[in-house]
Amino acid sequence: MRSSLPNFVPKAFVVKNLDTIVNVIGIAYGLLLVVAFFVRSKLTESMRVDALFIKQATEQTRPLNLVVGLLVAGYGIYSLAG
């Protein structure tokens, strides 16, 4: 007896273009930097741009994360759209 249900075979989502993967990672990192401006957690503190590149990172250098995060995420979105 044959079932009347449709034959469903799940397929893996495969991206064939490396540029897409790089841009999505860039967007995710940019959004993480924006979140790091507002939220203080172990993950966001370890990924802060000012903590990575400035020797004496303080609360006064924290807004740098917002600016860099918006630039990185914006460029990634622009690259995916274009």
Image (cartoon, helix red, strand yellow):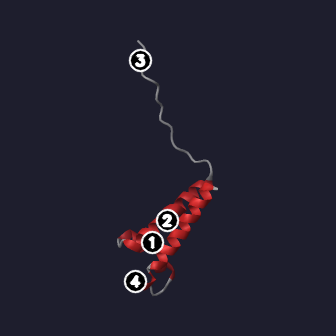
Q: Position of residue 50 (x, y in %)?
A: 48, 79
Q: CA distance from mark 4 to mark 1?
A: 15 Å
Nearer to us of marks 4 and 2 is 4
Kindly indicate whether the residue at mark 2 contacts the one at mark 4 (C-beta within 8 angstroms).
Answer: no
Nearer to us of marks 1 and 2 is 2
Circle 3 packing at 10 Å, graded few (<14), some (14-19), many (20+), is: few
Task: Say which mark, if any, is on residue 29.
Answer: 2
Q: Is residue 28 above or below residue 62?
A: above
Q: Which amino acid does the dot numbered 1 rest on?
A: Met
- Number of labels in the image equals 4
Q: Nearer the viewer, residue 20 or 9?
A: 20
Q: Secondary structure at mark 4?
A: helix
Q: Which amino acid does the dot numbered 3 rest on?
A: Ser
**Disc 1 marks which residue?**
47
Label whose residue precedes the other's in the sequence (4 or 1): 1
**Disc 4 marks which residue?**
59
Q: Nearer the viewer, residue 36 or 18?
A: 36
Kindly indicate whether the residue at mark 2 contacts the one at mark 1 (C-beta within 8 angstroms).
Answer: yes
Q: Quadrant of the C terminus?
A: bottom right
**Disc 3 marks which residue?**
3
Label whose residue precedes the other's in the sequence (4 or 2): 2
Q: Which amino acid does the dot numbered 4 rest on?
A: Glu
Label whose residue precedes the other's in the sequence (1 or 3): 3
Q: Position of residue 70 (x, y in %)?
A: 51, 69
Q: Position of residue 17 (x, y in %)?
A: 62, 51
